[in-house]
Amino acid sequence: MTASDEWLRRLGEGLLRADRAGIEGCLAEWEAEVGGLPPPSPERVAWCVARARVAAVVGEQRASLELLDEALTVATGRWRSAALAERGAGLVGDRRYAEGEAALLEAVAADEVHPHALIHLAWLRGPVQGDWAAALALYERARVPAEQDPDPTSLPRVLIGQIRALLHRGRTDDAAQRMDVLDRVVGEDAPSMRVRVMQLQASLHRSRGEHDQEVRVLREALTLAEGRGVGPVHVLNDLADSLFHQGALDEAEALLTRAVSMLRHHSSRWVPDLNLARIQVARGDLEGAARIATAVLVDHDDGSHLSERNLGARTLLMVCAASTGDLAAWDLHHGYVDAAVVQLGPAQADVSEILELAGEVATTSTRSDAWRLRGIRAWRLVLGLHQRHGRSRQADALLERLTAAGRPGVAVVLGGFDLERELGSGSMGVVYAGRHHVVGAPVAVKVLTAESARHPRRVRLIEDEIRTLARLDHPGIVPILDHGTVDHVAELCSGGRLVRGSPYFAMAQVSGVSLLTLAGQRPWPEVRRVLLQLLRALSYAHARDVVHLDLKPENVLWDEEQQRVVLLDFGIAAIRGRGRGRLRVAGTPTTMAPEQWRGQWWTFGPWTDLYAVGCLATTLLTGRAPFQGDSVEAYRRAHEQHPPPPLRPRVAVPPGVEGWLRQLLAKDPADRYPNAALAALDLEALEGDPDDEATLMTSLEDATLRAEVTSWTPGRFGEPAPRARPELILEAAAHLAPIRSTPFRGRDRELASLHARFEQVCRRRTCHGTVIVGPSGAGATRLASELLVDLHERGSAWMLEARADEPGLRHVLGRLFALDHAPTQDLGRRAWEVASAFGVAEGSLAGQLADALRGEGDLAVVSRDLLGHMARRRPGVVLVDRADGPSPVLRDLLPLIGQDLPLFVVATAHEAPAPVRGVEVLTVPPLRRARCVAVLKDAVPVSDALARRIAELAGDLPGPALERVRGLLASHALFFHEDHYELRPGVSLPTPAAASPGSR
């Protein structure tokens, strides 16, 4: 045994006896012995680790981490593993779970693994993460090293961990065997550890239903703890809990009152306080219980709103709210509890007993179905807790209650919505009418019931598309509210009508009738007005890289009251520039463009939708689709080979209409309008009365045809409805808040400057560059993107977006032309097809690009030539984002600056670059406070005071400010009050001085 081993043995014995004086004396003597040794000395490293461990035990976390940092600078082998283990445990205890787990994983991966590394990682896996099987395996692995460790606390800790894991796994007999070993290992000379052993014995008795023995053992443990002065508070709580479950409320209350008096000025007093509140609930004294729980929220606020303390208090307040019928109070506390149960570890979030009681009180209420649904939501959380803790017996019992709670003809809980009735079904799924469970606004929810939709790859693809569609923030767009998959609870409560794992989507309901009812029945001015609205709506979507791909009369609604067009079904939309692999896409045989029939997804673009607009316009004027067929194959031949038939409208139309339609219906994408804005300009030039802006919404509608191309169809969401209220958008899916688009505000002058520079490029037909410079979060990228969107919606330019770190312009063009996913043998053919779609008449340039991609030419030169040809045909804008440092893309673009072509190169950077002829700098500083506040309130309707506070913390930078307010929303730190959001009680924000450095 080495000298360090002897010191560890002495220290461990002190810890077993809870002899604080002995522990400090041992550490002092040890320090005196190793103090003169150089830092790399193993003896000094061992002392640092041991001292850090003791510091953590007594709550000196900062001192502990400082000692461990010192040790880790020089530690190797077994002691490095030990230092990493203690550091990881400290970080996990501080709820820095990711950092702590990384340290613990490094500790157990060491060549010489210290048993404490395995013990701490097992603690993380079991109590914190709820993976008791993994915890048990780690404890088993630690058994032999712990037996050989000179520290006498190691083996008892392993055995205690094993027993806890076995009990959670329901293996009581195995736990009893380990208990016999533990009983022999821990003697009477270690009172603190002995008390822990007795508490564990009581848990074993409880798991076996031996409640009298449980109480007896805890009474003995209390006597030992009080007699040896080793801190009886935990035993008082355990004994009170056992007596509570046996109905001995008076004795339990007396024990808890003693615990409270011992902890009068201690931060953990809230534990017996909340147990006292639980006793008041059992006695029916709801006012007393609410008073105690509310005091815990206020009196013990440590600035961390997501805490075990606040979770316990709010769960009790849910019981009180259910008992008194206070829906508003229930919703306020349930929102917090829902977030805390998910974000806190299982050990901190195990409020299953009280939460199940809250659900029971709510579910058995006769007041309304709303309470039954709230009770089911509480039980859904409890079920998750039981499953995380491996409590299969309790989970099975709760599943039976949930099955009984779901009855035919009553609403079903799905995510944040209550599904009230079925609206209809199709080949892909079922549409339900429902309401958001907090806001109460009507929604339509589409559940995709096809077995193929439950495939994990399909689910991920659908989620990706929904996140893209959630960015569409047009005044006429009904936003995507939420998405998810059907859980076990919804399956049970629906009687199996909803299948677990099925994806679902939710959106607000809108009203209107199918545009098909207008076909051939409205005069030209009205048809023209409808088409202009439709084109403007498409222009908005196309400017954000979303292509509809399934336009048809059935999914364009007419709102008679508002005299507005409402566009449905963006659910099968393609996102430009994304390779997809071969999946299935929905389409309609009457309106599918030739490239859709051929499955050439790499050529899809705005022109694909415009072909469908031509079909739809023909139907409106004639009452018939331009191409007919008696089979799918007949439709395919008609769209790919037959010219449009002569126009025979049922109403009088101007002479230019047929020519306009023929350009829309051209077989070659290059012969169609390149975008909706230009098509709208020509339509406006025809006779008729112009109309106001279009109303657009998204929905998901079942396909009438499925072709083997690349995308997917999630189906239809339901009946149309008014625009969703802002609070519904936010409450329904806080997890979508970070990616939702916000109105552009605060940079009007800078945007006007960029427009002026683009117009100068067009007038002079000379390539020019501008670098937008601003600190991180100032909005340089958003400003540049807004320019691109404006120009696209107006049809003023084509555009290309790139990241500065992409490997050159050739990579960007290859991605645009979808050549990066093409097999080598297909490069030439695909390059010609895409070049044609983009209007590059000299297809040889596309061929040269394909050759260069095969290694047969100079990629940079060919890429520049191709880009220049596109610009000469029509002005273009290239955006290069995050151009700090060397950029291969900018390197390839710089030779174009000053050339005779209308190309505007825009880059964003944090710092101004070195001067370059033909390149200007546009600086974007932090916003003025009032503008930053306005940006925040556009994103989330928070109070003026809260918006000003967040803006101040963020240094008036819109990016960090939006990130902070969206983070508060996602963590349920905000609640909706009247017409705005406020901080929940108990939630605090740092002072400006404490804001993260660099926020300005």
Image (spheres, grey):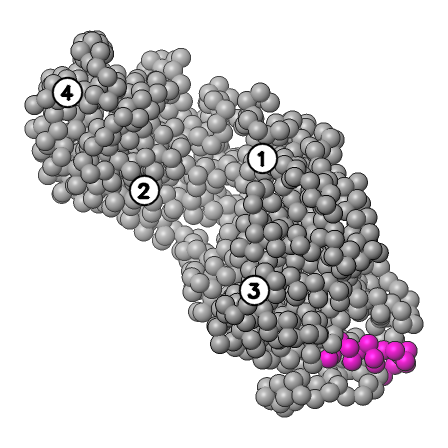
* Residue beneath disc 2: 130
Mark 1 or mark 3, which is nearer the start of the sequence? 3
Q: Amino acid at mark 3?
A: Asp
Q: Amino acid at mark 1?
A: Arg
Residue 398 in percent (x, y) is at: 36, 49
Q: Earlier in the sequence, mark 4 or mark 1?
A: 4
Left of 821 or right of it: where is 393?
left
Read off the magenta span. 650-666
What residue is at 50 percent from the left and 45 percent from the top? 374
Q: Which residue is mark 4?
A: 4
Residue closest to the eye, 781 or 150: 781
Which circle, 1 or 2, is nearer the viewer? 1
Disc nearer the start of the sequence (4/2): 4
Q: Is residue 661 above or below residue 263?
A: below
Q: Position of residue 900 (x, y in %)?
A: 77, 59
Q: Quadrant of residue 455?
A: bottom left
Mark 4: give few (<14), some (14-19) or many (20+) Cα within 10 Å: some
Mark 1 residue element: helix
Residue designated by label 3: 858
Q: Is residue 495 left or right of residue 956?
A: left
Is residue 244 part of the magenta span, yes or no? no
Of the 4 image quadrants, the one containing the C terminus is top right
> Which residue matches tag 1?
964
Image: 107 above or below 785: above
How far apart in space, not on screen, are marks 1 and 2 (Cα)? 29 Å
Q: Residue at x 22, y 18 (%)?
A: 44
Question: SS of the residue at dot 2?
Answer: loop
